[in-house]
Image (cartoon, rainbow, N blue to C red):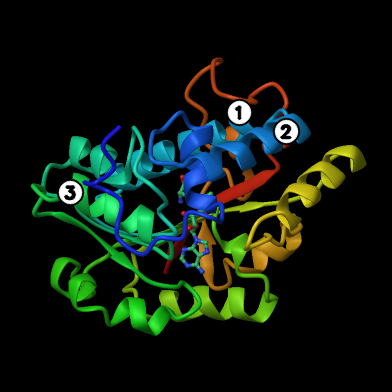
């Protein structure tokens, strides 16, 4: 395939990227041989990986649909990854064509591809940044020009805060973001966990993490709850992804929710 449209110069192709591995797991095309090899190693070690990625993506869709019904029309999606089918702007603008979305990721390939697919969409853009520097995100000129901080908005931190391995930094990051929002805004978080995971699975997933440049730190439900400080957690609370407002019997892992290894919830600033 022609990669010119989405592959920026200077991208290291000798190291796998979490964003591109996730894209491959979801059936996307924005990945390289090095990512596919790592992903296949991952699937062999941890056969649930593809379904877990699908569960994360389905949670994103249900959360954005819910937020749209609450009147939210601006979204800051941090750690957004590489756009695959069912992106935030597609779901949000389907509900409200005027909805505005800023995507942000640390991975240059994710940002380049996001920019390419959004070039004709005046209400959505993508920037590069590091969630560990939340002030830089909040003061970014494109964030400020597209999003109105005097009105409610949603910040999405989906399947990404486990890459912030320092606990205080993770809590402090969410706190800084929360302070920038007006009441009526929302913060959605999904986060990897080993709660209730068989020890064999823990070993498998840890092994995979060691092989990546950014090994994640999975946290317990109690630790993840701390990220929601001062937020009113909406029903059904912080639950395994498939239990968050499921849509039907075909939802991934509905019959065995802990298999997603991910807790998710939505908090409202009051
Ligand atoms: C598993 S993907 C999640 C994608 C999307 N949020 C979703 O739920 O479908 C995790 C993303 O977090 C990004 N990421 C990791 N560390 C980051 C950081 N410090 N700042 C911003 N993004 C980061 C990765 O590049 C990757 O695209």
Q: Nearer the viewer, mark 1 or mark 2?
A: 1
Q: CB atoms at circles 2 and 3 under 8 Å apart?
A: no
Would you name the residue on which mark 1 appears? 51
> With 175 as the anchor, is 167 left or right in this view?
right
Query: What whole-number distance in Å separates the C-alpha atoms at marks 2 and 3?
Result: 34 Å
Which residue is identified by label 2?
259
Q: Residue furthest right?
A: 199
Residue 267 x/y as whole percent: 49, 59
Q: Is residue 116 in view from this perspective?
A: yes
Whether the residues at callouts 1 and 2 have beta carbons within 8 Å, the answer is yes
Camera-near label (2 vs 3) is 3
- Near mark 1 (Cα within 10 A), the count class, few <14, some 14-19 or many ≥20, is some
The image shows residue 268 at horizontal and vertical percentages of: 44, 61
Question: Where does residue 269 sit, x and y in percent of width and height?
Answer: 42, 68
Give the spatial CA distance, label 1 vs label 3.
27 Å
Asked if disc 1 and disc 3 are in contact, CB closer than 8 Å, the reply is: no
Mark 3 Cα-neighbour bin, 10 Å: few <14, some 14–19, many ≥20 = some
Q: Secondary structure at mark 3?
A: loop
Residue at horizontal 86%, vertical 46%? 203
């Amino acid at each position: 395939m022609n990669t010119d449209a989405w592959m920026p110069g200077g991208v290291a192709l000798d190291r796998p990227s979490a964003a591109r591995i996730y894209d491959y797991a979801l059936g996307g095309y924005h990945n390289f041989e090095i990512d596919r090899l790592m992903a296949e190693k991952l699937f062999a070690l941890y056969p649930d990986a593809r379904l877990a990625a699908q569960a994360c993506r389905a949670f994103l869709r249900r959360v954005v649909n819910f937020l749209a019904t609450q009147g939210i029309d601006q979204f800051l999606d941090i750690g957004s990854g590489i756009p695959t089918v069912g992106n935030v702007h597609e779901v949000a603008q389907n509900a409200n064509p005027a909805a505005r979305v800023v995507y942000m990721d640390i991975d240059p390939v994710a940002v380049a591809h996001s920019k390419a697919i959004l070039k004709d969409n005046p209400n959505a853009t993508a920037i590069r940044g590091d969630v560990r520097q939340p002030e830089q995100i909040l003061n970014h000129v494109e964030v400020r020009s597209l999003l109105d901080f005097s009105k409610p908005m949603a910040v999405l931190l989906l399947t990404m805060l486990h890459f912030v391995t320092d606990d205080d930094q993770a809590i402090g990051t969410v706190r800084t973001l929360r302070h920038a929002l007006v009441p009526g805004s929302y913060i959605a978080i999904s986060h990897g966990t080993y709660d209730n995971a068989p020890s064999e699975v823990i070993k498998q997933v840890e092994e995979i993490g060691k092989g990546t440049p950014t090994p994640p730190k999975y946290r317990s439900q109690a630790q993840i709850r701390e990220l929601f400080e001062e937020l009113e957690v909406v029903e059904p609370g912080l639950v395994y992804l498939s239990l968050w407002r499921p849509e039907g019997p075909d939802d991934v892992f509905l019959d065995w929710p802990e298999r997603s290894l991910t807790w998710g919830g939505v908090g409202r600033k009051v």
